[in-house]
Structure formats: structure tokens, C-alpha cells
């Protein structure tokens, strides 16, 4: 079974409907969000789950957004929250290695728990920055 097939099967086991995008990555809907699973190198048992562009950056908001991203990345350990290459959006990723299909499902379930609350945590970080 290929890595892509393993990911598709794991997404189905979690109760979602996966599809392949034009880049060959897996995408599915979760809590009104589109989650991407970047397949990467076929032979490597490593994936990146991505919640892209979950927050738009208005002009002049760059610094507090970057500070909030840095704090979240530092505090949440397995999650990376960052301003994308356009400097217009905030994106979150959850990256992990897995040893077998069971570990893949567990890692994806853990990632989805985080992806489900990352926008709320980000909003709270921004609010706390504004209060200080």
C-alpha cells in the first residue's frame, strides 16, 4: 500500500471523506475547515497536516500576528503557527512521524484535536497581546 493510500484509509477510519487535490495531497473537511495532509516523500513515514490560511492579516497587523504565531509555536510544541509567504494569512501545521497504520491514525486524531481549537487559541493570544 502506498503512503497516499495509507493516508486515505486513515482519514476514512477517522470518519471523513478524503479526496486527492491537484498536487497529489489528501484533503478533507473537518469542523467546517479544509484540512490538507501533505504526502511528501513516499518512502518517508512522516506527514504534515495543514490548516491553511485560517486568519487573514489586515494591513498594519503583521507584528502582533507574528508575535502570536511565535508564542503559539513555542508553547504548543508539536504545532507550527506561521505567517505564510504572502504575509497575508496565518497557517497552522501539525507534523509527525509514524511507525505503522495505527500510529498514523492516532497521530492524525491528535492533530485534528489541535486543528479544532487553533483559531480560538490564536484569537486569545492576539487579545492578550492587545491587553498588555
Image (cartoon, helix red, strand yellow):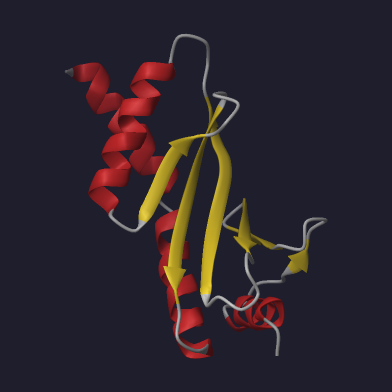
**Where is the C terminus found, in terms of image quarters?**
top left
Q: Residue at x 28, y 52 (%)?
A: 76
**Image height check: is 46 above or below 70?**
below
Q: Can residue 63 be seen from the camera position used here?
A: yes
Q: In the visual, does 33 lie left or right of 119?
A: right
**In-image side of 19 versus 71 (left or right):** right
Residue found at x 55% / y 53%:
50
Q: Is residue 124 visible?
A: no
Quarter holding residue 71: top left
Q: Quadrant of the N terminus?
A: bottom right
Residue 109's x, y, as percent? 46, 72
Residue 35 left/right relative to 58: right
Task: Name the one closer to the observer, 41 or 13.
Answer: 41
Extreme residue toward the left, this view: 132
Left or right of residue 124, residue 17 in this image: right
Residue furthest to the top in view is 60
Picture residue at 44% right of the left edge, 37% below the top: 82
Amino acid at each position: 500500500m502506498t503512503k497516499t493510500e495509507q493516508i486515505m484509509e486513515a482519514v476514512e477510519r477517522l470518519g471523513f471523506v478524503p479526496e486527492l487535490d491537484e498536487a497529489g495531497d489528501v484533503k478533507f473537511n473537518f469542523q467546517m475547515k479544509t484540512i490538507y495532509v501533505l504526502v511528501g516523500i513516499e518512502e518517508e513515514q512522516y506527514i504534515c497536516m495543514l490548516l491553511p490560511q485560517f486568519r487573514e492579516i489586515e494591513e498594519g497587523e503583521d507584528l502582533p500576528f507574528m508575535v502570536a504565531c511565535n508564542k503559539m509555536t513555542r508553547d504548543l510544541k508539536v504545532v507550527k503557527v506561521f505567517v505564510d509567504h504572502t504575509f497575508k494569512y496565518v497557517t497552522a501545521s501539525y507534523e509527525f512521524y509514524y511507525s505503522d497504520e495505527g500510529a498514523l491514525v492516532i497521530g492524525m486524531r491528535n492533530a485534528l484535536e489541535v486543528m479544532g481549537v487553533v483559531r480560538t487559541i490564536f484569537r486569545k493570544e492576539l487579545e492578550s497581546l492587545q491587553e498588555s
